[in-house]
Amino acid sequence: MPENAQFITKDFAAGETLFSQGDVGDFIFIIINGTVDVCKTSNDKNEIVARMSSGDILGEMAVLTDAPRCASGIATEPTRVIMVKDRTLRLALLNNDLPILKPLFSQLILRFKEAEQQANYYRRKFKKLEKEVAMLKESLLQHEISADN
């Protein structure tokens, strides 16, 4: 892979890893064709958190935040991607001159909306569980009171 290339087209075989959790984010990936599973490992368990396909962009969070990759990308079938170097993306952001910016920001906004929906779902679920626990405590207390009499 030439070090000065701004865009690299690369093919991955089924089962091949595009990037690994914990790696430095030096490229973002645009899937031309194929499918990639985004997997997170925690507590020695590997979980598929997303399935990406043609037109999807992945690996951008590590590039934009300079944080290690929070998940791995694994091709589930023969997959062709365009890899965009982190430096190219940063220069494009500064100069607003890369066609990928609009779809990249659209995807980021979609991910933030999905995260917000998940947070709202878990907030509602937590409130419901709090009510159930309060009712169980009350029931247990009533049971203890009647058992003492």
Image: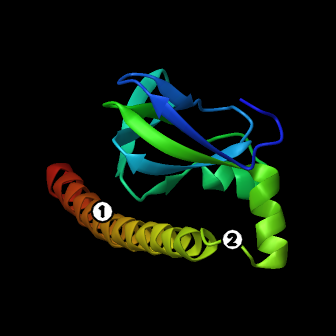
Which numbered tag is attached to residue 85? none
Could you tell me which residue is drawn at 83 percent across and 77 percent down?
A: 95
Above-or-below relation of 127 to 143: below
For the image, the number of numbered tags is 2
**Is 97 or 65 nearer to us in this picture?**
97
Could you tell me which residue is drawn at 36 percent across and 53 percent down?
A: 54
Q: Callout 1: 10 Å neighbours few (<14), some, many (20+)?
A: few
**Is 21 or 145 nearer to us in this picture?**
21
Assign a secondary structure to mark 2.
loop
Amino acid type shown at disc 1: Leu
Above-or-below relation of 68 to 76: below
Could you tell me which residue is drawn at 35 percent across and 50 percent down?
A: 53
Q: Position of residue 79 (x, y in %)?
A: 39, 36
Q: Is residue 42 visible?
A: no
Above-or-below relation of 21 to 133: above
Q: Position of residue 26 (x, y in %)?
A: 74, 42
Amino acid type shown at disc 2: Leu
**Is 3 or 123 nearer to us in this picture?**
3
Q: Position of residue 74 (x, y in %)?
A: 44, 31
C-alpha distance separating marks 1 and 2? 47 Å
Q: Position of residue 81 (x, y in %)?
A: 49, 43
Q: Are marks 1 and 2 in contact (CB under 8 Å)?
A: no
Q: Which residue is mark 2?
A: 98
Q: Quadrant of residue 140 in the image?
A: bottom left
| Placement of the C terminus among the 4 image quadrants | bottom left
Q: Which residue is mark 1?
A: 129
Assign a secondary structure to mark 1.
helix
- Left or right: residue 120 versus residue 67 is left
Dot placed on the residue nearer the N-terminal end, 1 or 2: 2
